[in-house]
Image (spheres, coloured by chain):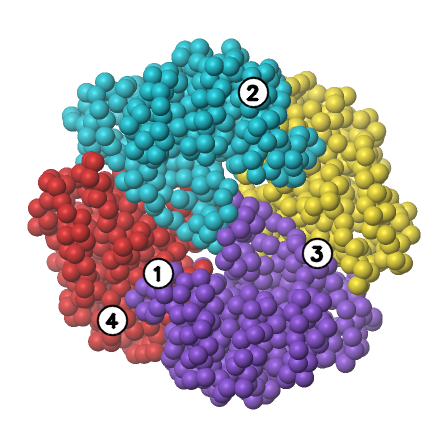
Chain colours: A red, B cyan, C purple, D yellow
Amino acid sequence: MKAGVIGATGYAGQQLVGLLNNHPEVEIEYLCSHSFEGTEFSKVYGYFEKDVDMVCIGLEEALEKAPNLDVLFLALPHGKSTEIVNQLKDTGVKIIDFGGDFRMNNVETVKTWYDIEHQDGDFLKQVVYGLPEINKSSIAKAKIVANPGCYPTASILGLLPIIDAPFINKKSIIIDAKSGITGAGRKATLANSYCENNENFKAYSVAAHRHTPEIEEVLSEQAGEAIVLTFTPHLVPMHRGILATIYCQVTEAINPEAVLSLYQNFYKEAPFVRVTEGLPETKKVSRTNYCDISIKYDVRTGKLIVITAIDNLIKGAAGQAVQNMNLMMGYPETMGLTANNYYL
Amino acid sequence: MKAGVIGATGYAGQQLVGLLNNHPEVEIEYLCSHSFEGTEFSKVYGYFEKDVDMVCIGLEEALEKAPNLDVLFLALPHGKSTEIVNQLKDTGVKIIDFGGDFRMNNVETVKTWYDIEHQDGDFLKQVVYGLPEINKSSIAKAKIVANPGCYPTASILGLLPIIDAPFINKKSIIIDAKSGITGAGRKATLANSYCENNENFKAYSVAAHRHTPEIEEVLSEQAGEAIVLTFTPHLVPMHRGILATIYCQVTEAINPEAVLSLYQNFYKEAPFVRVTEGLPETKKVSRTNYCDISIKYDVRTGKLIVITAIDNLIKGAAGQAVQNMNLMMGYPETMGLTANNYYL
Amino acid sequence: MKAGVIGATGYAGQQLVGLLNNHPEVEIEYLCSHSFEGTEFSKVYGYFEKDVDMVCIGLEEALEKAPNLDVLFLALPHGKSTEIVNQLKDTGVKIIDFGGDFRMNNVETVKTWYDIEHQDGDFLKQVVYGLPEINKSSIAKAKIVANPGCYPTASILGLLPIIDAPFINKKSIIIDAKSGITGAGRKATLANSYCENNENFKAYSVAAHRHTPEIEEVLSEQAGEAIVLTFTPHLVPMHRGILATIYCQVTEAINPEAVLSLYQNFYKEAPFVRVTEGLPETKKVSRTNYCDISIKYDVRTGKLIVITAIDNLIKGAAGQAVQNMNLMMGYPETMGLTANNYYL
Amino acid sequence: MKAGVIGATGYAGQQLVGLLNNHPEVEIEYLCSHSFEGTEFSKVYGYFEKDVDMVCIGLEEALEKAPNLDVLFLALPHGKSTEIVNQLKDTGVKIIDFGGDFRMNNVETVKTWYDIEHQDGDFLKQVVYGLPEINKSSIAKAKIVANPGCYPTASILGLLPIIDAPFINKKSIIIDAKSGITGAGRKATLANSYCENNENFKAYSVAAHRHTPEIEEVLSEQAGEAIVLTFTPHLVPMHRGILATIYCQVTEAINPEAVLSLYQNFYKEAPFVRVTEGLPETKKVSRTNYCDISIKYDVRTGKLIVITAIDNLIKGAAGQAVQNMNLMMGYPETMGLTANNYYL
């Protein structure tokens, strides 16, 4: 199959290139980069010298060639994919979009949180949310998939098995999430600089992060009622990984072992979810497509504590995109995603 | 004045030596170390060569000389100070203890969480909890002060102004705390190794950390009712700093500006608390005795979010101990604690 | 083919397990660990849950089963493999040894630098030094291969093309090498602790590191004369990677472009050496089996400066071992070593 | 005394503000920042809230007020101070300049390496090079002092005691230096970003760094003959610190203990140099004004290896500037520079 990548030189795009390059069924047709049009990809990332030998093309050429692809990946900043998708939606190419533009169903929500105006609300609803753990069959049939955000992936997977459970107070949910610095992307800003991040830990976008409505919409649909929750992101001085510590008030005494079974059952067909006894750590999922989940019950306060860990660039971006591509193309779900070699 | 330090070669002890060495009123009488008895302190920490020229003495000699000191600092692991304090409590020396042994008033609680058996419950109640923001006058008169834990300092300071407020649901409090690796001390363990901590983020002791009852006891006393809360510590790959993200459900709509004023008022006489508009970051308090606090209100969910930051080794240990010493000796509270030079 | 690993739970061993697990031709027959006999490998490294499902066996069982293997890897501390190799050398199993025990040909040198007594000097000489860039055909025929040290790999590859060049002063060579902390292994020591290494940079074993004679012996053989050189290792606060900055005094004016061609020519058949125009960086080779090399000429002082970078755990250990295995088994040299996905 | 700082919001400037703020004799008259004119200094660096309460002024105002100062510090990028110094040189204010503009005596050298055109070569020669270990008495009388570069400080201090020794081959000197990331300053560039520096180690400006002629000029003057040497800088993923590994070929067998004595003697009056037995580490001098030096002799190759460590922002910039100010003002050399509290 033939794949193209628009936005290949961002951090998520670059990880995707690495995964696609090793995928047994994929032939990369082109890499497109606005900033590096005409430059060899391996000059932007010396890492890939001898491995990926392609010159980045510009957007115009990429769009022109898109109809001949099987799958096109858009790894662009939020707001940049709306127009591209609208332009290509009636050609044969399947699209997997990394941005927030098409993740939510509601035109108003997208306008409020992202300042993106979708003209066609019906089309927005047809885009499939690419979380295989709930939407596997729709993804398989989808023409356009919105790849989930990194925080939403870690948050939603932690809450899915209990979001409609009677013992959870639906108004009590708090997600305290922590991410490595790659989550902020590759912009040359003071905020992204080594000296401002190293040996520092901080919260940001408190009660105001754009991933909040995405988490809420998916969970509301699963719960069958409106879920409103508190989400607080933090920055950790490390490259990769998200750990989410999720708190739910229980409405009655619970048996933690029964809840554990519930999780194990829920995910028994999910190849990339590991319900673990030990506490998740970001290093244990680093450079893998796994989401690790464990639960603890604070019997003194009646809080169920769910801890999840993913790699924000893999299960939270490029890996999940490949997982979606596998489903869309009819390949085994795990194809090209199992070379987990590097604990350190 | 003459000061002695028992446990001088642990990380908290070593920071204390640095602060005492630069304190204008202090003469360090001795440094005691079980592991390094007979070794020059500056051979253990080459950092101090030319600055601190003392040979570590053993415990027996330290105890013998203790009665001639003005203040003795015990920077020992939990459980190690009970016997020493009992032995010295009727001599003239004032004692500031870094361990958990004497922080709580209740013999049972200490037994349950620390496995320490205090014979004399009345004496335990006489030990003053060394948090100057609430106990300034008792500290000034105290003979024995229990220096607060690092997490409790960050947690309690964040909650004190609102713990008896009518608009807070007292059963809803969650403290999600994150600490640098120095918090784990200087033991040679695999858990403390570089390769297991670098580029990793994890929770630990979930719903089971010993600092929980300490936080609860102090807050309960302030609130005038029993406070039971959820406390979750995490490890951040960096040397120093604690950031606590604290969640409280409100029982009625609040005006965040009024709450901010309440905080500013509460701490208007506290030289080391900064109620800030910007979000706290551990780097902003690194190597200072400050506790930074800011508040956010998640109006969508009715959560008051309080974020605090301290340096775990300074306001969370050695700096707070010096602040307590200043109060006990009648010096200005900030003496020896204002050389804040190093943002990076 | 069937492979066994003795020393599977050290850092190099664990990386090898990851690589072997993804190698298309390898079936891992057993993982042996002295410290974790009877424990599931994925309990030691939670990272491998769902991927590697094996219980570590003890040494006795491993040795008993060794003759049924095709290849046995020994990823043990120096001095531990001598006895094992001697015991197995007449069985059919091919052995790849990670330790220093068999890397040098000279019984005296091994005794002096490693305090290991080899009884059989002739046998020592038969062990092949597993650096494919010089010994490809001998490795292909070898029964026992000594996998090179990490520093020697980075150093020797940087010097091979010029070690017999007339324009190099053979007495002037200085190798200033820098390594990430994984190079020190997985021992629970204060020296390995996070707080002693983070935000620190230092030299160690100055003019006394055991890798010096290994580098000298290999280069001497290539040069046809005795090479004695200065080697200084340093520790960098990061997980992985070695960068070697190598200085040679030239004896006559040189044309750096001609020297560059010489390097390109020398390595034109070496799939894992990249002679680069840009300066090597450890991140550019991280988690790959590549050695990047570039040269600079300081015309003001007549110094040829060669800079090389490898990943100490891959080209410097586990990856090179797999490369050797491929050669010994007649597989393509790069098999199982090309999944280079992770720049960050 | 009254001090002003132009360039207060860069990393070196900010460290200087911290030191001056704690100096017992200094009153900071103003902080000037081009980028942050009109902004409170403590809004740029939240770290200083409650400690430094000043609004940054612009350059015009700063220059106007300069004549009323005792000392003006210029902490500006290279090339920015030439004009300011020329404008103020005939007023009464003493100036300490952090840039490279006035460090060298030779108009040609400055032009070649910095592209700065000095009109007045005689004036350039009158500016005193602010390395107290050689120029103490000239600094005491100087009106304008050029504060040494960070690499030159670490390099020159390591070589001074032997640069005129008969046993050193003067053509053989190699300085392999490694610096933390603060050395690159506070610019918002991709090169300075966290994700490009964390977990990475690299050389840069090989055989081409601007600090080379500065080192050579100072050493040549001391040696009484032209010194030409090789200097290679590297970047270490950490905030602070420089370690220089210096290699000299000896021309005859030496007694390392005699050389050690030579160093101890040379620096016996230097309060901020520590000739140490143990190997220097950047952490041992972090946030201090010390330069640690140790020597090793590689008897096998006849190389004398000198290792030095400094904090690039303190002895390599702001601390050395305060040391120079102390000398210029007749204060004790160490005043305001001895609060060394923070090993970690």
Residue C183 locus on image (x, y percent):
55, 60
**Do the residues bearing badges 1 and 3 touch, measured as CB atoms within 8 Å?**
no
Left or right placement of residue B117 versus residue A186 in this view: left
Chain for numbered disc 3:
C
Chain for numbered disc 1:
C
Numbered badge on residue A333: 4
Label 2 belongs to which residue? Answer: B66
Q: Which residue is depicted at the point 47% across and 49% down?
A: B189
Q: In the structure shown, which secondary structural element does the residue marked by tag 2 occupy?
A: helix
What amino acid is labelled 2 in the image? Ala
Residue count near mark 1 (Cα–Cα under 10 Å), binned few <14, some 14–19, many ≥20: some
Q: Which residue is depicted at the point 81% across and 40% down?
A: D264
Label 3 belongs to which residue? Answer: C206
Chain for numbered disc 2:
B
Instruction: Using the image, determine if residue D301 lies above or below residue A28.
Output: above
Q: In the structure shown, which secondary structural element does the residue marked by tag 1 occupy?
A: helix
Mark 1–mark 3 distance (CA, rounded to whole Å): 38 Å
Numbered badge on residue C43: 1
Mark 3–mark 2 distance (CA, rounded to whole Å): 44 Å
- Which numbered disc, 4 or 2, marks the residue closer to the eye? 2
Q: Which residue is depicted at the point 36% across and 58% down?
A: A284
**Do the residues bearing badges 4 and 1 touch, measured as CB atoms within 8 Å?**
no
In the foreground, A322 or D168:
D168
Q: Which residue is depicted at the point 39% across and 28% down?
A: B101
- Which numbered disc, 4 or 3, marks the residue closer to the eye? 3
